Image (cartoon, grey):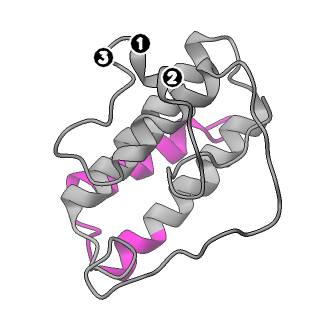
Amino acid sequence: MRHLEFVSAWGKLFKRTLFDMPEYLRFPFGKTFEDQFLVHRLFFKAQRIWYWEKALYCWRITANSITTSTLTAAVARDDLDGYIQYVVDLALLGKLDELAIRNYRIHLNGLQARLEAANLQQTAIYQEVEYQLHLTTPNG
């Protein structure tokens, strides 16, 4: 599998039997961005994946959606934890490569910018993002 952003569940149809397996193939309770913890695992488990470029429905953004709400440290923590889970799963499957690490850095840079825009530089999650960026920097 190429490293694409398979983070969100919207825009995807999954065969129900993919969810008939162990508990780790469930959306985690109480997490924001809960699909980040699961969608990549469904792709790893699927025997076939089909992609069609044609847009068949639209994503409606509402006033109280995740994408329009103010970023908090807790929401940023869930975001980071979900992506870390993806990186760990790639490593355990022997599929963690330079492209995946580069995509992770891009995600970290975006999260850092969103934290700065929300004036959350003095939080533990901001420090964690800086540390993750340091770990993934060549010769860091």
Tags 2 and 1 touching, CB below 8 Å: yes
Residue drawn at the location 43% of the way across and 30% of the way down = 85
Question: Is there CB contact under 8 Å for labels 2 and 3?
Answer: no
In the figure, is residue 72 to the left or right of 107?
A: left
In the displayed structure image, the side of residue 138 where residue 30 appears, left or right: left
Residue 18 circle label: 2
25 is higher (above) or lower (below) than 67: above
Q: Quadrant of the C terminus?
A: top right
Q: What is the three-letter code of the residue carrying label 1?
A: Met
Mark 2 is on which residue type?
Answer: Leu
Measure the C-alpha gap from mark 2 to mark 1.
7 Å
For the N terminus, the image quarter is top right
> Residue 134 in the image: x percent, y percent?
52, 43
In the image, residue 79 lies at what x, y percent?
Answer: 37, 51
| Residue 24 seen in the figure | yes
Q: Could you tell me which secondary element the residue under label 1 belongs to?
A: loop
Q: Residue 94: within the magenta?
A: no
Q: Disc 3 and disc 1: Cα gap in Å?
A: 7 Å
Q: Which residues are magenta?
A: 113-140
Q: Is residue 112 above or below residue 92?
A: below
As displayed, is residue 70 above or below residue 87? below
